[in-house]
Image (tube, rainbow, N blue to C red):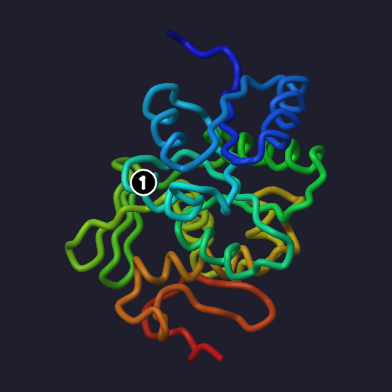
Amino acid sequence: MTKNVFRVLVVDDEARILNFLRAKLKVSGYEVLTATNGMEAIEVIHTQEPDLVVLDILMPKMNGLDMLKQLRTFSSIPVIILSAKGANGDKIQGLTLGADDYLPKPFNPDELVARIEAVRRRAKPETTVPVMETFSLGDATVDFKKHTVTVGGQEKYLTRIEWLLLSELTHNAGRLMPYEELLSRVWGPEYRNDVQLLRTWISRLRFKLEDSPAKPKLICTVPKTGYIINEPASCPPLS
């Protein structure tokens, strides 16, 4: 059956939050599914195929981080994690495991809707920018047509966000991409100041593309400014 609306799965063990978000998101035009723990959420994803997951971290049976880790073994569905205010470790771990965004509790429901809309925009194919077929740099080869990346002949799996970020860097190879520009292009203008988010995803890309992520040779850092993808051995040491 063809889905006519954007389907959001909300995963939280608090019935009050589930009911509130179900009502808010339905009014905003979304179809809403719910689950009360990670195990239930995995089952819903397999059977109902939602378009996006709003995921709490602290839950019984299977917490949000464990659920996200399992999810990323078979799906690249967008995930927005909800974390306790000030729980920076949870935010970083969630992003490292493949979450697309995070929102601290307590949160403004209108901000959650705005972030869901931002994820929807990122998921739409960009038709105005020409897409190169391949890009090679050092031992890394990106095949945009086949949607594959190989490093030293070994294929690497990239998430959707990693693809978008790598695409921006490679289509602007040799040019410095300021933090604000990369954030606005990949996540949207509302994220232009979230440098921590960008650093986390750059680190993920380096881990997959670089021989020594701590001493990058492909994705170079320009301190306090941005990133540039360039010829190997041209990156200064990370501070």
Does 215 appear above or below 41?
below
Identify residue type, mark 1.
Answer: Phe
| Looking at the image, residue 36 lies above or below residue 209 | above
Q: Dot 1: within a 10 Å radius of its alpha carbon, few (fewer than 14), some, or many (20 or more) residues? A: some
Front residue of 110/166: it is: 110
Foreground residue, 83 or 126? Answer: 83
Find residue 28 and report its horizontal and vertical position in percent.
76, 24
Q: Position of residue 173 (x, y in %)?
A: 49, 65
Q: Quadrant of residue 227?
A: bottom right
Q: Left or right: where does residue 168 sit relative to residue 137?
A: right
- Residue 76, quarter of the rendered image: top left
Q: Which residue is mark 1?
A: 144
Q: Quadrant of the C terminus?
A: bottom right
Which part of the image, by quadrant, shows the N terminus?
top left
Name the residue located 63 percent from the left edge and 59 percent from the top edge.
Answer: 182
Q: So how many labels did they put on this image?
A: 1
Residue name at image x 51 percent, y 65 percent: 93
Point out residue 52 in the picture as x, y percentages from the top left corner. 55, 34
> Can you say whether 179 is above or below 18 in the image?
below
Disc 1, SS: loop
Please tell me which residue lies in front, 105 or 94.
105
Question: Could you tell me which residue is drawn at 30 percent across and 78 percent down?
Answer: 211
